[in-house]
Amino acid sequence: MAFIRTVPVEAANAAVAEIYEGDQKSWGFVPNFTKTFAHRPDVYRAWQQLNATIKSSMDLRRYELATVAAAGTLRSSYCTLAHGRMLAEQVMGSEAVIQLLTDRESAPLDDAERAVVTFAEKVALAADQVTQGDVDELRAHGLSDEEIFDVTLAAGARCFFSKVLDATGTEPDAAFQDLEPGLREALTVGRAIEAKPQQNPS
């Protein structure tokens, strides 16, 4: 599940039990990433607050497009799976998400969205190579400086979370195995999904 030990639910202290309970309610189980962050629950709560604040200033579609673009470029299966599933279920459908990851030219994006995706990828992969021209391209598609900063924040924040999970060997949850095969394959861009527990024969 991870290269470092994680805190079992039954051994959680009060601070860890609080974050476990919150994510159990949200996800229906305690995700692997929560167990990794259980080593520093205050950091996890700070991340949740930061991410929620970034997200609150953005349209859901733009936030998820920027996040999936950054996560995909970082080869973060965990984040690409989680946010790609969100895009598929709540925003644009599975086929469109598959195209976003595998056949960008066919993806149903408008010109501004294509520019956002390209910019988010560059922020995640080579922020030192972002130029004034890259920013002006977004402006040309109608984004304000505040909106450009929002995209930058979404991509930059994803670098933190994705890198922490991959550096600790935190596997994407086995629940992602239930995604339809084409979507699951497109979104698994790096570390493999955790295997489902084997059922004991009755």
Image (cartoon, rainbow, N blue to C red):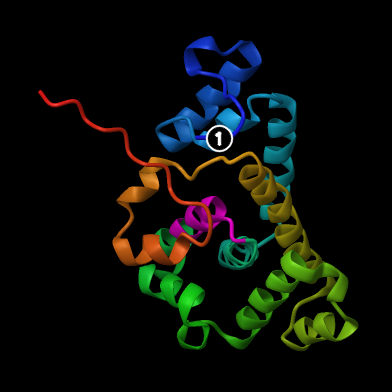
Front-lying residue, 193 or 114 = 193
Find residue 150 and report its horizontal and vertical position in percent.
Answer: 76, 63
Find residue 118 and report its horizontal and vertical position in percent.
Answer: 67, 78
- Horizontal relation, residue 165 to residue 1: left or right: right
Type of residue at label 1?
Answer: Ala
Find residue 130 and report its horizontal and vertical position in percent.
Answer: 84, 76
Identify the residue shown where x is 56% and y is 17%.
17
Q: Residue 141's image quarter?
A: bottom right
Q: Is residue 79 visible?
A: yes
> Up-down: is 112 above or below 44?
below
> Is residue 77 located in the magenta-colored stretch of the structure?
yes
Q: Main secondary structure of the magenta part?
A: helix
Front-lying residue, 87 or 33 = 33
Residue bounds of the magenta highlight: 75-85
> Up-down: is 168 above or below 106?
above
Residue labelled with disc 1: 2
- Horizontal relation, residue 29 to residue 109: left or right: left
Crowd band around label 1 with a 10 angstrom C-alpha radius: few (<14), some (14–19), many (20+): some
Q: Is residue 54 visible?
A: no
Callout 1: SS: loop
Q: Residue 181's image quarter?
A: bottom left
- Horizontal relation, residue 159 to residue 30: left or right: right
Q: Residue 137's image quarter?
A: bottom right
Q: Quadrant of the C terminus?
A: top left
Identify the residue shown where x is 49% and y is 17%.
9
